[in-house]
Image (tube, rainbow, N blue to C red):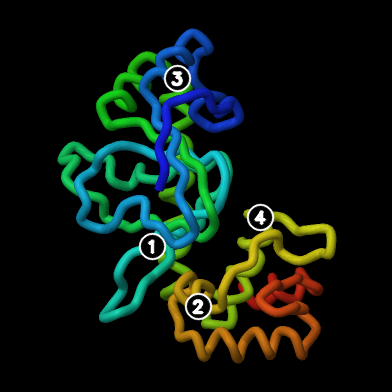
């Protein structure tokens, strides 16, 4: 992890896009630009809430303990996303989740006090942040319903569709983020062996194609059918 407060162009981040231009000098003076290497932890369950993280580059997984020696991935954060907001509450005690870099990442960090000041000064930022929180809550509720009501095959199909929607595809048609089968299993709440078998089945039935860990969706409608 490397920190610096020098010049760094964060103009395309959620934070800078939504705040008043007149507030940008304050952002420049109070933010921290932090670089994380793949595998580094931004914060973990139980850590004291220190502030909020605004993604600039890279991919982060947001996850929590789920049974003994297991984890459940709640979401993947990418460019323009926000991380650490789940720790915000009237108590401000600790983060209920862990955030781990899946690639080299660059984030813009605001301390809790300055983040609150930013909300109070920038009404558009406050509104858009509230909408972001509302969208996240809806997605979380949907994921909990999926875990309860969708088959493992349906959850796997939906996860692939969500990953493609989140990251897009590269020039060869593969999802533009290489995700491990272990992380897919943690994302859909099942065993690694089940994911391995499902990826093989999806390949053999022409729903997807793979190249090592890379995955390309061939039959999008076929996958959607499995999620209904």
CA–CA distance in space, label 3 to label 1: 30 Å
Residue at the spot of label 3: 28
Q: Are marks 3 and 1 in contact (CB under 8 Å)?
A: no
Q: Residues within 10 Å of mark 1 (few under 14, many from 20)?
A: many
Residue at the spot of label 1: 63
Residue nearest the viewer, comparing 41 with 88? 41
Q: Point out the frontmost of discs 3 and 1.
A: 3
- Which mark sits nearer the N-terminus, 2 or 4? 4
User: In the rendered view, does 197 fall on the left or right side of 101?
Assistant: right
- Which mark sits nearer the N-terminus, 3 or 1? 3
Q: Return the x and y of residue 120 as percentages of the image width and height.
A: 33, 18
- Residue 31 lies, with reference to residue 150, above or below; the image says above
Q: Point out the frontmost of discs 3 and 4.
A: 3
Residue at the spot of label 4: 167
- Which label belongs to residue 166? none
Location of residue 83 by image quarter: top left
- Which mark sits nearer the N-terminus, 3 or 4? 3
CA–CA distance in space, label 2 to label 3: 38 Å
């Amino acid at each position: 992890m490397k920190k610096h407060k020098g010049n760094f162009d964060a103009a395309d981040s959620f934070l800078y896009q939504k705040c008043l231009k007149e507030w940008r000098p304050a952002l420049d003076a109070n933010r921290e630009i932090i670089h994380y290497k793949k595998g580094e932890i931004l914060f973990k369950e139980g850590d004291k809430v220190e502030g909020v993280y605004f993604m600039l580059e890279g991919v982060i997984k947001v996850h929590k303990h789920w049974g003994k020696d297991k984890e459940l991935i709640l979401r993947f954060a990418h460019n323009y996303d926000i991380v650490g907001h789940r720790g915000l509450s009237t108590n401000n005690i600790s983060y209920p989740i862990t955030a781990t870099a899946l690639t080299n990442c660059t984030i813009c960090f605001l301390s809790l006090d300055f983040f609150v000041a930013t909300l109070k000064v920038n009404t558009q930022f406050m509104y858009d942040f509230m909408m972001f929180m509302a969208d996240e809550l809806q997605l979380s509720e949907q994921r909990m319903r999926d875990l309860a009501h969708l088959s493992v095959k349906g959850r796997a199909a939906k996860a692939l569709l969500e990953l493609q929607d989140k990251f897009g595809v590269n020039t060869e048609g593969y999802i533009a983020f290489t995700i491990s089968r272990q992380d897919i299993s943690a994302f859909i709440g099942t065993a690694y062996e089940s994911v391995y078998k499902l990826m093989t089945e999806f390949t053999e039935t022409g729903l997807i194609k793979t190249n090592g860990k890379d995955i390309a969706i061939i039959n999008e409608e076929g996958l959607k059918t499995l999620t209904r």
